[in-house]
Amino acid sequence: MNLKVLCFIILITNLGLCQSSEDSIAILNTFKSWEQGWAEKNVSLAIEAYDESIDWTNAFGDRYIGKENLRTGLEFIFSLPFVLAGTSSGNEYADLRFLSPEIALVRSQLIRAGQKTSTNEIMPDRHINHLRVYQKINGDWKIVSHLISDAKQKK
């Protein structure tokens, strides 16, 4: 989905919360560094929007607390060729909700096609959900918590 369209939708749905459009845009722009960091296998770029105290858990239950611990964890994850195989289609949705002038939640989902298992088998398309908690710190929106999960196909 086009970022401008997504921002417009989010702005319309959040008018009653008295948040500025700059806040919404700043938050949504953090998706760019995350997605580009994964595409380029660039850990520094992927974690650019995270606070030093980040609490991050991936879809497989690996949890890292603190930006440096996350950096080390992602360096390992990025070294696994089967993890980075495939492509992400961008966000299917990104629901932004301000809980206060300094706290926001963003739920989003992307689809990853062609990822492989550790035995080099292609996985079915993954529908990956993200729940990010943002805090406005010294005027900048930082991610303080990020939970990632897979939506498994119902049988």
Image (cartoon, helix red, strand yellow):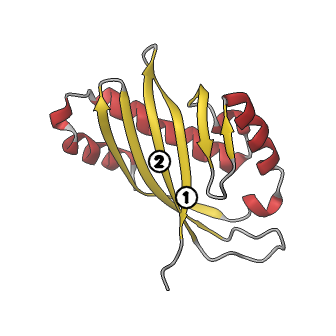
Q: x%, y% of residue 10?
A: 28, 44
| Mark 1 touches mark 2? (CB < 8 Å) | yes
Q: x%, y% of residue 26?
A: 41, 30
Q: Is residue 146 above or below residue 134?
A: below
Residue nearer the viewer, 30 or 138 = 138
Residue drawn at (17%, 36%) of the image: 15
Looking at the rendering, in which quadrant would you find the N terminus? bottom left
Callout 1 secondary element: strand
Q: x%, y% of residue 130?
A: 50, 51
Residue nearer the viewer, 53 or 43 = 53
Q: Is residue 126 above or below residue 62?
A: below
Q: x%, y% of residue 7?
A: 32, 43
Residue drawn at (15%, 35%) of the image: 16
Residue drawn at (59%, 36%) of the image: 55
Extreme-bottom residue of the structure: 155
Residue drawn at (73%, 40%) of the image: 42
The answer to which quarter of the image holds residue 134 is top left
Label at residue 149? 1
Label at residue 131? 2
